[in-house]
Structures are given as structure tokens and as C-alpha cells.
Amino acid sequence: MARIGFIGVGNMGGPMARNLMKAQHTVTAFDPLDTALAAIVEAGAVQATSAAAAVEGADAVVTMVPAGPHVREIYLGAGGIIAAAAPETLLMDCSTIDVTTARNVAGAAAERGLDMVDAPVSGGTGGAIAGTLTFMVGGSEAAFAKARPILEHMGARIVHCGPAGNGQAAKVCNNMMLAINMLGVVEGFTLADNLGLDRQVLFDVVANSSGQSWAVSSYCPVPGPVPASPANNGFQPGFTADMMVKDLRLARDAAMKSGTGTPMGALAEALMALHVSAGNGPRDFSSIIETIRAGG
């Protein structure tokens, strides 16, 4: 089994690291948040005092950190991962960041002869715990072949999206589409309420009709029809509104740099940012239904 350095063991990274340990990999973990690090150490990981220390002696490194600046710092900064990694170490960044940063960091890794993939995930904390995440992977064929056996211990679907940065491209496209789709579902269920149509009846119709989508069948934003959806748990997050705004901003950045018009994405970002500004950032993004019900 592999020796894996894991940097970022919070809500997503922690369960992912646990699944690697369940698969008998040795995990050396680092996180600047003491409580997150203590929890994974209690679960059986070896504690590291820094990102560079977590990389020492590792066959592979997994990073799951909040944003592009964090990725640049831990990979390219003084005492960073690229400088600390041994020549055969595989680098896997599972953060959701901008495409440009992903490609720049992968280029720096390649200059040192290191294989690297960007491998952002879809599936939320539930998928991380269950080991059913989808990984969207950017990198060379050789790097993907090395990464896949490790990623399979944390996810159910491992998709090679092309060269470096394409995993991030797939992720921002997916999440922009999810936000747009969820807003349509939210408006439909809100309209149904106002027309006196029972929610379960609408769900039964839509789930078997042309309006069907993952946002309806797996993440329905009203209590009742989908027991496992956040709407049935006070909108405790599988994926927070804060994180959705972050991803929509990444999509906007990618759209601007590529000269792509995304008017629905821009509207989704504006509405989700309004929802967050009212103090809903830590709640699940599907709680946007409350803002829509209140008339925006």
C-alpha cells in the first residue's frame, strides 16, 4: 500500500483521508486547523507539522484546500510541496480552483519532473464519507494512470477530462449548471406552493417527466419528497452556499478569459451572492429557496 501525504483534512478532506486509511494506505496528514488535524490523527493518521513534512517520504500527495491562493502557496511557496517532493512522488490537487492556477502549478511540477493531476470532486460531504465522489481529472495519460488506483478508494467515478487544468474546467462547468438548474427547481416548487399544488404531487410528476434532474431527484429543495436532501435537515450543508458562490465566481472568471457568454451563470451568481449576504453562507446552497420565496 502507498504512503500518502494529505494536506487539508476538513469537511471534505477528512472523510477522503479516512477512506484511504480504510484501504490500508498510510496517511500522513497536515492541516493548519488544529481540530481538523486532531480528528484525523485520532482516526489513525500520522501527524505532520507542516505541508512539507507531510510530503516527506510520500509516494503520493493529496491536497484539499479552499482556493487558488492556498494551492499556490502550498505548492510553490517557500518550503512548498514541489520543492519538498521526491522525484517519483505523484501530486494530486483535489481543491476546486481557477483553471489558470491549476495549469501553472502543474507546469511547475513538470519542470521538476513530477507527475501531477488536478482532480476536483463532485458529491459533497456525503459522497466524501461514502467514498462515492466523482473525480474530474486533468493531467497527462501517465499521471492519470498513476492517480486512478488511489482516487478509486475515495470515489466511484474517475473521469479523465484531458490535460492539466481540464479537471477544473469540468468542475466549474458542472457547478455552474447545477446552480442554474437548482434555481429553476426552486422557482418551480415555489410556484407550485403558490398555486396550491402539493409538493409531493409535483415531485412525482417532475421526477418522471421532462423537468427531471439531479436537483429534483436527489436534492429536492423542499421537505418531504427526498428524505436525504438538506431540506429535510434544516439545510445542513452537503455543499454550502458560500462554496457555490466561490465556484460561480470561478466559472465567471473562466468565461471572461475564454470569451464565453454565460448570462444564466451570471444571474445564478448574483442571486446566490444575495442569499449569502443575508447570512446564509454556511447553509446548504439549496436553501436559496427561502430567498426566492421572499421575493429575492
Image: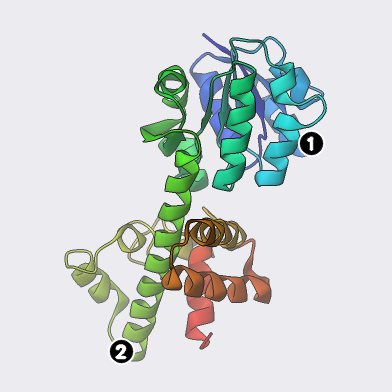
Residue plotted at (62% across, 24% down): 109
Relative horizontal placement of residue 91, taking residue 55 as reference (left or right): left
> Can the viewer see residue 284 in this picture?
no
Residue 227, position as x, y percentages in the image: 38, 58
The residue tagged 1 is: 32
- Left/right of residue 256 with respect to residue 177 in the rendered view: right
Rendered image coloring scheme: rainbow
Amino acid marked by disc 2: Gly
- Mark 2 falls on what kind of element? loop
Task: Residue 190 in the image: state x and y as whole percent.
Answer: 39, 82
How far from the left and from the top, in percent, is residue 52?
A: 76, 21
Residue at coordinates 60% horizontally, 58% vertically from top-left?
246
Q: CA distance from mark 2 to mark 1?
A: 50 Å
Q: Amino acid at mark 1?
A: Pro
Which is nearer the N-term, disc 2 or disc 1?
A: 1
Q: Position of residue 211 (x, y in %)?
A: 24, 69
Front label number (2 vs 1): 1
Residue 196: image tag: 2
